[in-house]
Amino acid sequence: MNTSTKLTLLTLLVLACLRVTSGAKRNFKCPSGCACTKETIICVGNTPIPRTVPSEFTSLSMVNGSIPEITEGMFSLMPSLQLLLYQANSLSTIKDDAFSGLPHLEYLFIEENKIETITKNALRGLRDLTHLSLANNKMRFLPRDLFFDLDSLLELDLRGNLFQCTCENKWLMVWLKNTNATVSDVFCAGPSDMKDKRLSDLPIPPGECMSTDFVRHQSIPIQSMSADIFSFKEDIYVAMAAPNTNSCVIMEWDHIEMNFRKFDNITGKSVVGCKSVLIDNHVLIIVTQLFGGSHIYRFDEQQNRFTKFQTIEVFNISKPNDIEVFQIDGDWYFVIVDSSKAGLSTLYKWSDNPDRNETGFNSYQFLHEWFRDTDAEYVEVDGKSYLILTSRSQPPVIYLWNKNSQKFTLHGEIPNVDDMVAVKAFRVDGELFLAMTCYIGDSKVLKWTNKQFTEVQTLPSRGSMILQPFAFRDRHYLALGSDYSFTQIYLWDVESKTFHKFKDIYVQSPRSFAVVTNERRNFIFSPSFKGKSIVFEHIAVDLSL
């Protein structure tokens, strides 16, 4: 029904009201503020909706009223209605089953109101509806399949709204192209690059409306400082340093229950680090402790558990803070980072000489004395091997591997980056970046350019102990943990080549984040220093649904 036809209909209704007849049932009193004819009621101003009307009345019009919402079954005591007009009111919301109990309704005009929200099932049950107008409201989006029940719809008017031509309205674009009803032209109010274009003319490429989310999958009642993921014989494990229980807890992925379950428990004294390393047929766990030295445990297949394999020479380490494992030219190494001013970060090298009974790790080089190191990260770039150490007392330093001496030599420092507690390397499109965590201040993202690291982005951080990069397929993220609030997930933006805020998740005092990929499902393992450790699943989300 076009605008002139509707105006004609409204004019006829008003004229009919001016000729109020006594033909209506004598025992029905026309509501105050309304005009009634034999079949029509027209109410103007702040008049309540009539509670019930005789079956002879088939038309109800409410004009210039102040009712804010239409709730479920509001007109159910008027089952004979064939026309309902709700014009120029203060209406802002239409809720589910708002028109239930109106089996014969054919004309529904809800125009010139302030509607912003209409729920998915608001029009449910209107199978005889032929003409619908929601013109001149403030709707930006319509819920998917809003018109699903309207089997008899012939004309629809959606003009004068603020529709956004984005993924949330993709279903409407498709519906407009396929419906047999006559629909007024619907124009985009936004985004700016689509303003004033017809919504039905805007195809959205496949995949553009796909996004992702992180949903809680499992809660593990273990307080932990770290989570190290490793695989052995097609099974997935995670080693968790749990200082409150003086243990390194080994969890195993249960392929049936699709959860992590406890596999082994390595007891110790004030365990602060658990790190795996798989060398040949050895599955090793390096366990660092504040007291009682540090040790290496090896998996014993006969006993199906980890047993002590080696005590590490740690005379120069007072407060172990991180373990970094890596290979150079086929040789295995690890660094224990010492955060005590009286300690000394130490490099260990793997030796496997059964004839001399020399299978194990031995101290190989002392690094960075008196600087309270907090974290280490090994990177390879431009054919060279580097070791980066962060510190609470000076800018991060870079060590370069000398192929002649087979040792690390001090190469330089990263300027203008102070008081960093963690450093993690990652690559996007082949380019090398560093994520550097600051507890109070700004955490930073740096890029390797012209043989040096330069700052490209700052991320405000409060109480942050970890800024962890990770990726699933072509989506790159940063997780900025906090002792004071939610963990902030940032997503890499391809156009700006920076990270944008994506989502908040809650983990109490996180200290690390580890990626777990299994059976085509992706997870983030999030250990908590003060609460339960949480496993989040990374899922695909269709924004057009």
Image (cartoon, rainbow, N blue to C red):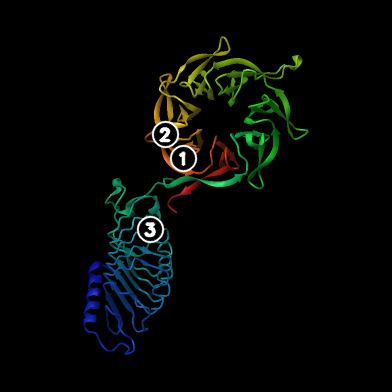
The residue under label 3 is which amino acid type?
Leu
The residue under label 2 is which amino acid type?
Leu
- State if disc 3 and disc 2 touch (CB < 8 Å): no
Q: Which mark identifies residue 459? A: 2
The residue that disc 1 covers is 488
- Looking at the picture, how far across and down is residue 145, in whole percent? 42, 60
- Residue drawn 42% across and 52% down? 544
Would you say 450 lies left or right of 43 here?
Answer: right
Comparing 296 with 401, the one in front is 296
- Please state which of the two labelled residues, at mark 2 or mark 3, is closer to the viewer: 2
Name which quarter of the figure residue 532 lies in. Answer: top right
Comparing 268 with 443, the one in front is 268
- State if disc 1 and disc 2 touch (CB < 8 Å): yes
Judge the density around disc 2: few (<14), some (14-19), many (≥20) Cα neighbours within 10 Å.
Answer: some
- Residue drawn 40% across and 52% down? 168
Real-space Cα separation, disc 2 to disc 1, in angstroms: 10 Å
Q: Is residue 323 visible?
A: no
